[in-house]
Each structure stands twice: as structure tokens, then as C-alpha cells.
Amino acid sequence: MATKTIIDPITRIEGHLRIEIEVDDAGSVEEAYSSSTAFRGLETIMKGRDPRDVGLFVQRICGVCTFHHYERGVEATEHAYGVQIPPNARSVRNLIWAAQTVNDHTVHFYQLHSMDWWDVVSALSADPVKATEIAHQYHATPYNASVSHYQRVAERLTAFVQSGQLGPFTGGYWGHPAYKLSPEENLIIASHYLDCLGVQRASAKASAIFGGKNPHPQSLIVGGVTSARDAINAERIGQYQFLMQETMDFVERAYIPDLMLLADKYREEGLAGHGGGLSNYMSFGAMSLGEQAWDQRPFLLPSGLVRGRDLSTVHAVDPMKIGEEVAHAWYTYSGNETSLHPLEGQTNPAYEGFNDDGSLKTEGGYSWVKSPRYDGAPVEVGPLARMLVAYASGHERAIEVMDAFTDRMNLPFEFWYSTLGRTVARGVETQIVGGYIPELLGGLINNVKGGDERFFTRYTAKDGQGWAMAEAPRGSLSHWITVRNGQIDNYQAIVPTTWNSSPKDGRDQRGAYEASLVGQPLADPTQPLEVVRTVHSFDPCMACAVHVLNRDGEELAVYEVAV
């Protein structure tokens, strides 16, 4: 008989996510349910506002990927108005995008996900000499790898643990049998965990050079950007370049070698396909490189859809085939609608509560997240989806970094279809994005030197519908706007975590989280580390996924929290 386990909350940052699993007698996950339990947001307060203010409001959807919501909101209004921004403005936006993406990926791995792979308690007993020798197996000049440095890290961790104030290490499944690293290997990644706390400031500062500030930038406006003086200042450009070089040095000498270490020690899990989940992968295109219509626009990483892991064919994405269902979400649609396109989207809360035993009412609604579907099918979005779409599209750099990693680690391509593969995909994508920064800077410099100092396009506001689709670090992000009488009449955002964390739809098709957990064997069902590891590999952001608020301040629901 299956036993039920509840993990709530499961996220380390950005919102509340509850995972319920049913485990069979053999210790494998038989069924899984993903539920966002937070009711919050911004979409409906956009109604009645000036469309030109959209960006500054919607970036508050999230505290991490702020710029990406900001950019999508501004671009949705530009699409509705028919505005085409100048090349210099696109370059500036892309430089912010690159810095934010590199920052997001490194912080996600080390601060939010790496502890699912390394054991801090085990690291305390490591031999710094052996740790130094191991670090040199994965890079000729590994980051901060010396006996004295590792000794200081071990002493720092020991003092931290002995203080009893564990902070981010509180509640971990330390000593769990699913941890595979030796004490020395744990110490190496623990060292880089601490290093990243300092290094991530560099990429954050870089994004603020052209964004005005971080995490909530303020330099984008409908028609272009306001940071023109920074973009034509050689000193400011040089500062950005230096800061990103510092960050990419950490990526190449710490992040990628650590992923190699994980691939080496956790290869059995990767080869078994644990956490592989859905076989459909979608990308809206990462980093716009032109101002053509979206379906004709070049991207750094291309848009497309891979169905059933068939890399022989990349299908074009049709924005009109996107719909959101609410069969198992705490919302309702007027009439008999079962799915709505985001341009016609509705946000009508219909909270159903929990069972008497505190479990989810899975026969009805069980999440504040809707169920986005593409042409009626669930899809996975995010770094793995982007890399697979790019690989299948013949993208030379994507093929190069993915093949280089599997060749170095002697792994088959199927390794990518796993929790481990998803984690590594985020790292190799960071190499691609960071490696493109010199070309971005060169394009901006050459364009300005050639006499083009345009950073803004004048326009006339008008009514209409608009949308913006592109990739954020966590995956495919789209914003949709309807303007009537000069004001916003409807606004919807479908974010990466909504795609991935969605509950079942009306045909009981699982979302990416749920699908990735079914079939997962657990070493200890009472401590479901493998579940946490797989869900974290998607980088959940529930704050992004749920955005509902009554702009008039009316009471919508009352919740009693036991303390």
C-alpha cells in the first residue's frame, strides 16, 4: 500500500511550494502532486493603468529574475504600440540580460541547489591535502584550491556548526545515504559555496552599470533605454567587462569543475534517468539579437519545441497554441471554458481548501498555479530545454559545450535526460552566455563609434494587443497585454515556474515537476532528499508563478495559520 509523504515548504527562496508524494512498497514514488500554497501577485492590479508603467510594476513579480519581467513587460507594450527599439538599446538590454543570467545560474547552483548534492557535516572531517589533489583532477588551475585555503574553510564551517546557528544548513538531510561525495569532495564544493557569496556581487554590479540598480533595475522604458551615457562611456564599459571576466573565471575554474565532479560521482543516477520527467522541451528563444517579428527573430539560443525527445525535428512555436487550464488549480473560468489563451486570460480565485487530514484535495483544485499547455501538451522549460532545442537546431556552440562535457566525463547523450543532466545544463549554458559577452560589447562599441548614438525610438501610444516571449533564466517567459482607451484592459504573465510546477490538467497530464518525480527510488522515504534534489534542479520560483491580488483591497479569503 502506498504511503504519503508531504514536503512543505520545499523551496529555499522565492515562495512556498508543497510537494506530496505517494511511495510504493518498493520505496519508489508512485504519484506526485505539486502545489503552490501562496496566494499573492500583481497581474490584476495592472488593469486601468498606463501601459508605459507596466515594466516597473511587473518586475516586482519576483525578487530574483526582476529584469526579465521588466523587459517582457516593456516589450509587450512596445509590441502593442508597434515600437521598434534601436540596435544600441537592444545591446544594452542584452548586456543586462547576460549579467543577470550568469548571476542567476551561479547563485542558483551554489546557494539554492548545491546542498542537495554535498554534505556539510561530512566536509568537516575532510583532509585539505587530499581535497587539493582531487580539485586538480577536474581543472589544471582550480579556483581557490590550496591546503591552507581548504583548512580555513573547514575551520570556518566547524565554528559555524558548533555555534548551533546553522542558518542555510538548518533542516538538511545530513548523513543521508543518497549523498555520494567523500569528505574532501564535499569540502571542495563547500569552499565554492562560500566563494560564490562574494563572486556573485560582481555580476550583480555589472547588471547595475546599465540597469541603474540591482535587483530591481530602472533603465528600461518603452522605446529603448535611459542609460545612454553609461553605454557610450569607455570607463563604464570597461567596468562591466572586468566584473564579468571575474565572474566567468569563477564559472570556468569552480562551477564547471564542480559539475564534472558531480557527474563523476552521481553518474549512476544520471544514467538511470532519475528525474528525467517529461519528454517535451520548449524554448521561446534566449537573448534577442534583432527587432524582426518574433517568429523571424534571431536569438543567441533559438526558439523551438522538441517532442518526445526526438532531436531529429525541431517544431516552430506558435504563440496562439498556448493555453492555461484550471481543472486542478484554485481558479475558475466563466462559462464552460476549460482552457484560455493568455490574451483572453481570467484570474478568478476558487480556493477549495485541504482535506481534514491536511492533505491536498487532489480530485479537485490543489494549487494556486494554473496549468499552461502548448497545443494541449505539458512541456518542460528552462536551461535543459534551451540546450536541447539548441542542440537539435544545430547550434554550434551548444553542440560544442554539451559534447565536450559528455566526452570528458565518458557519458552517453541520454545522461542529459535526468536531474543531474538538468543541473549540468544550467552550467554549460552559463559558459555560452558568458562567452558571448565580448561580442555584445564589441557590437555596441563599434556601432557607437560608427556614429549611431540612438538609444530611444519615439512613438505614438495606441490601443491594441501585444505580447512578449523570450527566455528568462528559469525558462520560457511571456507577458500579454490588451490596451483599450489608453489603459490596460487585461494583463497576463505565464512564467517558467508556472509551466514546470503546474498541477495536472483536465486530462490528468502531469506538469514537469510531477512527471520528474514519478518512478524516483528513495533511499529513505522519511527523508526524501532525492525529491528535493529533483525539484530544486528546476529552480522553483513560486513568487513568479502566482500573481493574484485585488486592486481594491477587498477581502478575498481568510486563512488561519496554526502556530
Image: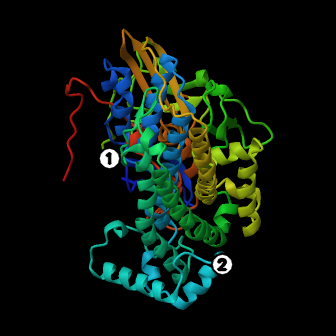
The percent coordinates of residue 27 (x first, y second) are: 55, 61
Front residue of this view, candidates 531 and 107:
107
Quarter residue 422 falls in? bottom right
Mark 1, mark 2: which one is toward the viewer? 2
Residue that sits furthest to the right in the current view: 312
Q: Quadrant of residue 255?
A: bottom right
Question: Amino acid under label 1?
Answer: Asp
Mark number for residue 140? Answer: 2
Q: Which mark is residue 357?
A: 1
Q: Residue at x 38, y 57 (%)?
A: 12
Q: Name the residue nearer the viewer: 451 or 436.
A: 451
**Crowding at label 2, few (<14), some or many (≥20) Cα neighbours within 10 Å?**
few
User: Are circles 1 and 2 on residues that touch, CB within 8 Å?
Assistant: no
Instruction: Determine whether the residue tagged by mark 1 lies in a helix, strand or loop.
Output: loop
Residue 533: give x, y in percent of width and height.
51, 60
Q: Given the image, on which type of amino acid does mark 2 rest? A: Ala
Looking at the image, which is closer to me, 306 or 4?
306
